[in-house]
Amino acid sequence: MYKILEKTALNSSMTKMVVEAPLIAKKAKPGQFIIFRVDEFGERVPLTIADYDTEKGSVTIIYQKVGASTMLLDTLNEGEYILDFVGPLGVPSELEGYKKVAVIGGGAGCAIAYPQAKALYKMGTAVDIIAGFRNTDLIILEDEMKAACDNLYLMTDDGSNGNKGFVTTALENNIKNGVEYDLVIAIGPVPMMRAVSMLTKQYNIKTIVSMNLMKRNVTYRAMEQTAREKNCRLINNVEVN
């Protein structure tokens, strides 16, 4: 049994939960995930580790309330327990050796992009975070992202935060203004990741995107083909939206 230490609503559809799991926190690395099961009748669901604290022995997960399991998880509150919480699983992200990186998150993908940026920034890498949301009400992790980068660019589709445009708008502006990235990491909706990879191809910038293996369909296969054609590296991270 794993105790819920904190529970915070990030917006109307997303929740951050801090879980007491000292053994997982001790071994966790960016890019890895856990599998949880709320109770003996629940399904096993993977979620990317959003953060971890080795001193407190805690692991942070962020989930979107879109299915039966995440809806059930969201009925639990601080002080209550999750039956199973297994990890860390998966291969950690390879982040060493870069000087200047743009970490790009779209919507719920920012929950996965954030730990990548935090790890890079902690290593001494110069990091720009570009985060895109439909509107101001959906923005998540603004303070956390500010603390994990040199520059944070928040974009909204409707311009309700004062910065109207897509993540590619900010990325291209930076590149045209002389910012030299040796890596771009993009995590979010497939159309956004495709647009980023097509843009970075023009400037010959190494690009890593994250795909959801649990939705392996025609769209995913098309993205695989695009990645090969655009000379991008395709990373398969398991996550639940």
Image (tube, grey):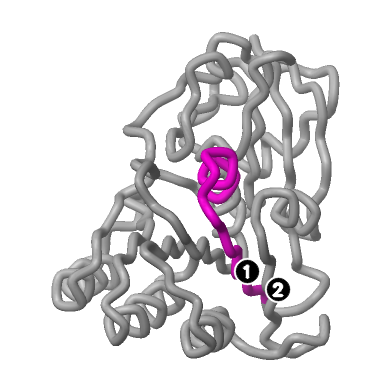
Find residue 235 and report its horizontal and vertical position in percent: 30, 52
Tell whether 223 sits left or right of 185. Answer: left
The residue shown at (49%, 86%) is 172
The residue shown at (62%, 35%) is 51
Q: Quadrant of residue 85?
A: top right
The residue shown at (61%, 66%) is 107
Tell whether 3 sits left or right of 219. Answer: right
Find residue 216 and report its horizontal and vertical position in percent: 27, 58
Q: Quadrant of residue 31?
A: top left
Q: Which residues are magenta?
A: 117-133
User: Label 2 belongs to which residue?
Assistant: 154
Front in this rendered view, residue 36 or 96: 96
Tell whether 69 sits left or right of 89. Answer: right
Q: Amino acid at mark 2?
A: Leu
Which of the two labelled residues, at mark 1 and mark 2, occupies the earlier sequence position? 1
User: Label 1 belongs to which residue?
Assistant: 131
Tell whether 230 sits left or right of 119. Answer: left
Q: Secondary structure at mark 1?
A: strand
Find residue 140 and report its horizontal and vertical position in percent: 74, 59
Quarter of the image with the N terminus is top right
Q: Amino acid at mark 1?
A: Ala
The stretch drawn in magenta includes residue 28: no
Q: Whole-Å distance between the Cαs marked 1 and 2? A: 5 Å
The residue shown at (66%, 49%) is 148
